[in-house]
Structure formats: C-alpha cells, structure tokens
Amino acid sequence: MLGKTKKIIKCILSIILILFIIGWPIYNIALNNIEINQEDISKGDEWKGIITIWDFPRLNVETGSRYGWIIQKIKKFEKDNPGVYIRLETINWNTGPFKLESGLRTGNLPDIAPITNDFIYLKDNVLEPLDSYFSDNEKQRFKYQAMKAVTYDKTMWAVPCMMTTYAMFLNLDLFRERGIDPPLDGNWTYEEFVEKMQKLTYDSDNDGKIDKYGFVSFVKPNYYNLWGIILSDGGELINKNGDYSFFGQKAIKGLNKVVDLKHKHKVTPENFGTLNENEAWELFYKEKKVAVYPTGTWAVRVLENLNRKGEGFDFTVANYPIGDRKLPVSLNNSVVSYGVFKQEDKEKLDMCVKFLKFLVQDNYQKDLDDLGMFPAKSGIRGIYENNPKMKRLEDCLAYTQILPLHREWKDIDRILQSQIRMALIGEKSGEDALDEARNQINQLLK
C-alpha cells in the first residue's frame, strides 16, 4: 500500500513538473502583457517578434501610476504594428542602475533601456549608433541640452525623450508669516538669499530653541540639489580638454557658500550634512519647518496635490542664487533618453528605433505634463500655459548644466560628495575638502 502511494505521488509530481515546463513561458508572456498572435507575426514585410525594454518608474501624481506612461505607449505601438510585442521589465531607482551595469558585464541586457548621459554606455561596443536613423532636421528638433546629453565623439547614442531640472522650492506661507517677499521673477543674489534665510530662521513657539529654518538639503552621490549654489561663482567640474578642474578660488568660494549657510549664517538645521534625502524632504513638505528646499521638477505635482487635499501649503519656485557667474545655474542628469543595445538582427534594430521615434512624437511630448517633465523637443508649446510654476521651471532649463561625459564621473562624483559632506559637518574647511578631493581624483585618474 505504501509503495502504491509513493507511485501516485511521483506521478502527480511528474505531471506538475511537465505542466510547469510547458506553462511557464506562457505565464511569463502573460505577466508582461504580451499576447502573441501567430497570424500577426506571419503577416507583412516588417520585422515581427518581441522587443524587451527596461524602464524606471515615472510617477503620475494624478493617477498614482508609476509605469503608466510607458505602458500606454507600448499598447498603442503594438496596436499600430501587429506582430511586434514590447516586453516591459520594471526596474527601480535603487537597484536599476546596478542591474544595468551588471548586464554590461554579463551580457544580460534588454534591447532598449534608459541610459541618461552615462559615459559607460556611450560606446560602439555597447549601444547602436543612431545617426543614420535621424536626419539633420530631425536632430535639430531636439533641444540643444538634450542632444548634447546623448552625443559623444560626434555620434548620437540615444534618443532624448524628456527633461527635468532642479530649482528652489519656497513655502510661501512661511514667507508671509515673516513678512518676507519671495525673489522678484524668481531671481536673487546670494546676499539677498542669505538675508531672507536669516529672517526665516527663528523660534516660532518662544521656548528658546530655533525650530524654523530658512534652508535645508542633503548630500548624496548622483544627486545635485546643492550644486546650483556650489557652481554659482564659475567653478568648472571638467574642462574642455576633459580634465578634472574643480579646484581653485572659484570652486572654493562656491563650496564655502553652502558651508556658510550652516556654520556662519546658521540658517539650516544642525544636522545639515548628515540628513538623508527623505529626512530633508520631510522637514520641508511634511513638517513645514523649512522655508526653502532645492529639488527636481517632480515636486511641483506632489506639492500641488497635497495643497488640494488641504495637507500642503502655498508655494512657488525660484532660481538658485546668483553669484560671480552672473547667471543662475543648476547641475543635473536632466535628460531622460533611451538607447538600443547591440543587435544582431538589422531588421529588429530598425523596429527598436521605430519604437523610440514613436515615443517622441509631438503629441506624446505634450503628454509629459502628467509626469511633471518637459519635452526634449523644441517647439512643443502650451503644455504649461496655465501653470506658472512649471513655466518658470521650463525657463530654468536654459540655465541647467548636464553632467560631464567623463569615463570616471561616478567615482569623481562619489569622492566630491564625500568631501563636501566633510566640510558641511565641520571636519574640514572647504579648501581642505577640495584639496583632498583633488588628490584622490588625481590618483583615480592615474
């Protein structure tokens, strides 16, 4: 009887295994919203099959959707191109970059992925060059910063799709409580900025302790919220020859402006420099203890949504304070672009590019207001006509510097941000911090 039971169990397990082997590919396709129609694949002259794309979340504040923008485009493209199926694999901001870098080492890569303007991707052995797919007129439709971000060695390596930038976000309720005017037309000098921040730093409940502050931010590799101040006096990260150049008086003066906000002017919380991103953001939007916070354009929709719910505050946006450069400036990996990884099948490559061109059609560029982003193409007018905050941020794009295209930028950035943190917490002077950064970076580049 026991032997018979064992045989039945083995038989059941064998059936389950067979069903799994047969069913898993079907389930995997269904999981990715792909319903393959063999008749569609056999029709027509164009390439048919599956294209894989990895993508990061892009929040639609109105709907809460994180991948809705790209999913809608995929469905429309599949409908217009029977027999072509786009398989989306979602990646997140924490692990996604490491997954892509791991894919470079292992060869486990999708057909298409967002590559920003990262040097490690802009190479002939990694991405397909796209110049032959875009006429001069088509290239000229893209904004200058957008094309600069995807061009290296005079070659176009990706298709710019959307843009963002950093700016100063101001809690106008706190400004009004203290009788302080925001900067006229969103522009202020560093001296004007400091004067206002000092008035906005005070003891609100008369218990003898400062509990409201003019300014806060955070320091973290690959985040550039503070760099509009740091670069305001003309400091240059990488010069025209491709050499590291963030040292000397212009760089020191810019860094000291940030350090002075804490140690000299005392307009920040004591833990400015050790605060992480979430802690700094919550002090601004949730606890309402900070009047000015620099961040990305995504915050407009978030703050507007909170205000509509009665949980937020009236706010506006402004440029970074102007220094010796005489114009406001910000630094950002501001261009979202998609590249095509190396393909063996020319017809499949053609279809991948067709999909990317589909993503940047003018009508879809106008949809970017749902994401709080800006078109990568010029001449797309009217999407923020009735939103003065976003319109001002769109104007800020003209002052945005894109990250340097340097083979060691990630490590340079890590070293710089670490030394900036040391200056902010008072372990080093601004000059000593930049000297140490220069020494470490010189060793790295050797």
Image: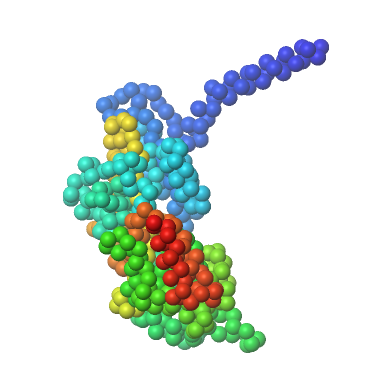
Q: From the viewer's perspective, is residue 428 above or below residue 415?
A: below
> Which residue lies at the image location 51% right of the left edge and 75% below the top edge?
428
Q: Can residue 166 be seen in this view?
A: yes
Q: From the viewer's perspective, is residue 278 above or below residue 229?
A: above
Instruction: Report the front residue among 9 and 127.
Output: 127
> Which residue lies at the image location 51% right of the left edge and 52% below the top edge?
94
Q: In this view, does 8 lie to the left or right of 253?
A: right
Residue 87 in percent (x, y) is at 43, 37
> Dividing the image into 4 quarters, which one contains the C terminus?
bottom left
> Which residue lies at the image location 28% right of the left edge and 52% below the top edge?
151
Residue 381 in percent (x, y) is at 27, 60
Image mark count = 0
> Which residue lies at the image location 81% right of the left edge and 12% below the top edge?
1
Instruction: Report the front residue among 405 and 12.
Output: 405
Instruction: Report the front residue among 302 and 427.
Output: 427
Residue 395 in percent (x, y) is at 31, 68
Q: Quadrant of residue 317?
A: bottom left
Residue 74 in percent (x, y) is at 39, 41
Q: From the viewer's perspective, is residue 214 above or below residue 92?
A: below
Q: Can residue 384 be seen in this view?
A: no
Q: In which quarter of the image is residue 51?
A: top left
